[in-house]
Image: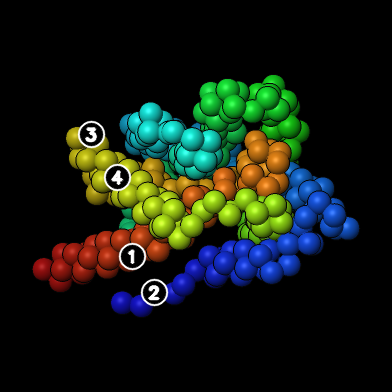
């Protein structure tokens, strides 16, 4: 069984390396207005997101409510509650910064495109996957800042939930609504050129990642993270994914889901969106140098989830295809 390394993951590694070697282009003295370009890019990402979101498909997807509750409950409740269990172990400001990065990861919405693709590979419930992946991003606009606000209010005087929501409304909510309103006119064009829009999304994400890590390297933010700490973070990310994956499967069995719904629950309920994470971090953490540490767990999680779910999806999909062939030949 052959697996291709995801090109986007490779691009992230290259961008982080470039930020390490040439931080001056993303630092405070940079002549290039990366912040302004990033803000405009974020608004366009969510405008295109709304443009591609079909209101009719969203309405029809509401029927399988048990599956939807499980997926969204795992995404926005189970993940954060697991991280909250480790809050008493914090003993320093450094520990708290790492913990907040994990809480940020845990409170993020699910991915859209990769969730649907993986569910399709594994022969799961595709309409339910489309609905949950789409609605998750909208819920995250409200829920993610709320989770972070519970703890950032106590540690950062500059963190104002009102200001955060105003910025979210301007840069995220308004573009999404505008896209939804124009779906009937331009929705087909957005679907037709979806590959180009996806390339644009990833380009903006890479730009924001470069800016974040360039500022972090310039101010030596990662000087406190040694190889051992990095390995602990990586293992924690890996363990978090598998814990939620098996918990989602256990709850699916208890709820009596069929195989297709269980696949969708496990694939959609365990994913976290690097796209949303990057653009939300830009708004929720206005200090560019702090974003490097904030984005580290989500980038590791993104790489893990693509590799692991690709492996599982291929295995499950092949097994189901074999079963179908056996039934046809019987």
Left or right side of 53 for 322: left
Q: Quadrant of residue 154?
A: top right
SS label for mark 4: helix
> Which SS class for mark 1?
helix
Task: Give the x, y percent position of residue 316.
Answer: 27, 61
Q: Residue at x 65, y 54 (%)?
A: 220
**Contact (CB < 8 A) between labels 1 and 2?**
yes
Mark 4 or mark 3: whose residue is earlier in sequence: 4
Task: Tell me which numbered mark, 4 or 1, is placed earlier along the sequence.
Answer: 4
Marks 4 and 1: CB-CB under 8 Å?
no
- In this picture the colour scheme is rainbow
Image quadrant for the N terminus?
A: bottom left
Nearer to us of marks 2 and 3 is 2
Residue under label 3, please give it.
255
Instruction: Return the residue found at the far right.
Output: 31
Dot 4 crowding, Cα within 10 Å, few <14, some 14–19, many 20+: few
Residue 243, label in figure = 4
Of 15 and 65, which appears nearest the observer? 15
Q: Is residue 291 above or below residue 284?
A: below
Q: Residues within 10 Å of mark 2 (few under 14, many from 20)?
A: few
Q: Nearer the viewer, residue 147 or 185?
A: 147
Q: Nearer the viewer, mark 3 or mark 1?
A: 1
Residue placed under numbered mark 1 in the picture: 311
Q: What separation in Å lies between label 3 and label 1 (alpha carbons)?
A: 25 Å
The image quarter in which residue 223 lies: bottom right
Q: Is residue 45 left or right of residue 122?
A: right
> Where's residue 98, x and y in %?
50, 42
């Amino acid at each position: 069984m052959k697996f291709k390394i995801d090109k986007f993951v490779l691009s992230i590694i290259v961008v982080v390396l470039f930020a390490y070697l040439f931080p001056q282009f993303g630092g405070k003295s940079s002549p290039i207005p990366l912040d302004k370009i990033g803000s405009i890019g974020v608004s366009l990402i969510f405008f295109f997101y709304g443009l591609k979101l079909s209101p009719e498909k969203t309405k029809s997807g509401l029927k399988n409510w048990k599956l939807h509750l499980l997926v969204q409950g795992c995404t926005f409740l189970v993940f954060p509650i697991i991280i909250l269990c480790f809050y008493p172990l914090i003993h320093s400001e450094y520990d708290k910064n790492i913990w907040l990065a994990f809480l940020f990861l845990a409170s993020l919405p699910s991915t859209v495109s990769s969730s649907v693709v993986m569910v399709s590979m594994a022969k799961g419930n595709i309409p339910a996957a489309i609905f949950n992946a789409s609605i998750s991003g909208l819920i995250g606009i409200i829920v993610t800042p709320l989770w972070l606000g519970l703890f950032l209010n106590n540690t950062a005087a500059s963190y104002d939930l009102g200001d955060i929501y105003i910025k979210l409304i301007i840069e995220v909510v308004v573009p999404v609504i505008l896209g939804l309103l124009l779906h009937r006119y331009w929705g087909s064009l957005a679907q037709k050129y979806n590959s180009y829009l996806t390339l644009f999304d990833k380009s903006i994400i890479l730009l924001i990642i470069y800016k974040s890590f360039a500022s972090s390297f310039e101010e030596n933010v990662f000087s406190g993270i040694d190889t051992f700490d990095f390995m602990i973070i990586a293992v924690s990310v890996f363990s978090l994914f598998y814990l939620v994956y098996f918990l989602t499967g256990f709850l699916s069995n208890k709820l009596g889901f069929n195989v297709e719904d269980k696949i969708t629950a496990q694939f959609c309920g365990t994913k976290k969106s690097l796209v949303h994470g990057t653009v939300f971090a830009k708004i929720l953490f206005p200090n560019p140098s702090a974003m490097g540490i904030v984005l580290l767990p989500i980038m590791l999680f993104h790489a893990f989830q693509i590799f692991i779910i690709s492996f599982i999806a291929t295995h499950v999909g092949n097994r189901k295809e074999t079963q179908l062939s056996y039934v046809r030949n019987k």
